[in-house]
Image (spheres, helix red, strand yellow):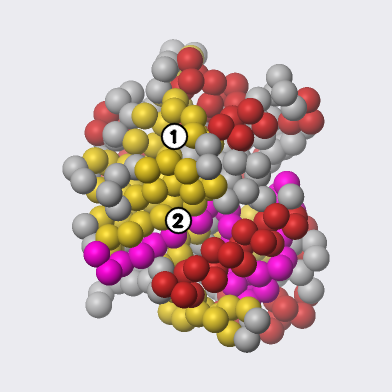
């Protein structure tokens, strides 16, 4: 099969929409408790897509999974966004990227989007929820319902969490979440939410209180859109290690093992939010852990 930006699982078409990709953080900062030797042992798998060849920088992608299902156009996660003040992350401050152009090249205009799913409400998953028009933040997708986990909506609201100031999510609620809610386009959900006959949202807490996954079941095909369950393929073989951004480390480990186990048992394609390279993979059991079975036929960045 020829590599492509688009794959079909059952009755659902999946297209990868890039915002940007490249290095993000040093390994020892991103994964403080992951041994340096583990990175060395897996260099053949990680370099160059997920780890720099000549440094210790983790490489990731900011991307959206575009789904076409039952006649609807659905976006899973919306990246960092343009024009936004991000004082904690200089590389994301006041970006000017052609994300909407990439979406248009996939045949989708903002007004065509029926549903936006934010797997959680971190800065790099909600950015294109809104865009700056005449000095105001307005919903980018005017006809869409935005599905947001209630637990994250409450947790990341600065009125409930003063610790947000100075962190990576500073300004995020105000410019990327609240304007959509004020426009009446947000639907909050808890525990689970059925999207259509093929797609369902499930709570997968740990990384954030409201972190979630989208499950796809169509014909004999299965997939898990796992958000930030993993940021590097090294977490397949080392599932007990978290990123520095996991709010509840113990719960993150438990959720990761549970969902990797389900993927290995069912043959589900795993589609993380941030994997560069081929971006998606199948996993299998290996001893008490897991291994990469094969990568998806999605063209490498």
Identify which residue, 91 or 79, lies in the foreground: 79
Secondary structure character of the magenta stretch overall: loop
Q: Earlier in the sequence, mark 1 or mark 2?
A: 1
At horizontal 72% and vertical 78% (from top left) the residue drawn is 38
Say which residue label 2 marks: 225
Query: In screen coordinates, is 196 left or right of 43?
Result: left
Q: Position of residue 95 (x, y in %)?
A: 53, 36
As drawn, 187 above or below 103: above
Using a 10 Å C-alpha cutoff, classify the residue at mark 2 as few (fewer than 14 neighbours), some (14 to 19) or many (20 or more): many
Q: What is the secondary structure assignment of the residue under circle 1?
A: strand
Residue 121 in view: yes
Q: In the rendered image, which quarter contains the C terminus?
A: bottom left
Q: Quadrant of residue 237?
A: bottom right
Snapshot quadrant of residue 113: top left
Q: Which residues are magenta?
A: 219-247
Instruction: Please give the label number shown on residue 147.
Output: 1
Position in image of residue 120 (x %, y %): 56, 41
Does the segment drawn in magenta span residue 243? Answer: yes
Q: Nearer the viewer, residue 229 or 62?
A: 229
Q: Position of residue 137 (x, y in %)?
A: 48, 19
Q: CA distance from mark 1 to mark 2?
A: 15 Å
Is 32 inside the magenta-drawn segment? no
Residue 114's mark? none
Query: At 33% across and 72% down in the image, what residue appears?
Result: 297
Q: Residue at x 33, y 59 (%)?
A: 217
Instruction: Say left or right for 33 vs 145.
Output: right
Q: Is residue 196 left or right of residue 171?
A: left
Classify 230 as above or below 183. below
32, above or below 154, in the image: below
Tell me residue 232's x, y (percent): 60, 65
């Amino acid at each position: 099969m020829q590599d492509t930006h688009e794959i079909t699982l059952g009755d659902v078409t999946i297209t990868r929409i890039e915002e940007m990709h490249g290095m993000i953080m040093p390994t020892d900062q991103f994964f403080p408790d992951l041994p340096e030797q583990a990175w060395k042992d897996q260099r053949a798998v990680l370099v160059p897509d997920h780890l720099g060849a000549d440094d210790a920088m983790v490489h990731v992608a900011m991307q959206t999974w575009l789904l076409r299902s039952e006649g609807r156009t659905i976006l899973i996660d919306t990246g960092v966004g343009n024009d936004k003040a991000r004082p904690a992350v200089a590389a994301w401050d006041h970006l000017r990227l052609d994300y909407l152009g990439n979406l248009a090249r996939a045949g989708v205009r903002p007004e065509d989007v029926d549903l936006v799913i934010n797997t959680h409400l971190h800065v790099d998953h909600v950015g294109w929820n809104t865009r700056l028009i005449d000095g105001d933040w307005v919903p980018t997708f005017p006809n869409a319902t935005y599905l947001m986990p209630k637990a994250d909506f409450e947790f990341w609201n600065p009125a409930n969490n003063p610790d947000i100031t100075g962190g990576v999510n500073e300004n995020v609620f105000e410019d990327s979440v609240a304007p959509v809610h004020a426009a009446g386009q947000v639907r909050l959900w808890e525990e689970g939410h059925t999207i259509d006959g093929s797609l369902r949202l499930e709570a997968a807490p740990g990384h954030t209180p409201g972190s979630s996954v989208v499950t796809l079941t169509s014909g004999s095909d299965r997939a898990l859109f796992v958000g930030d369950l993993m940021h590097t393929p090294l977490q397949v073989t080392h599932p007990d290690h978290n990123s520095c951004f996991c709010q509840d480390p113990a719960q993150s480990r438990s959720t990761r093992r549970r969902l990797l186990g389900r993927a290995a048992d069912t043959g589900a394609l795993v589609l993380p939010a941030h994997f560069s390279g081929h971006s998606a993979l199948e996993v299998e059991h290996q001893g008490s852990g897991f291994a990469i079975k094969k990568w998806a036929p999605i063209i490498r960045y």
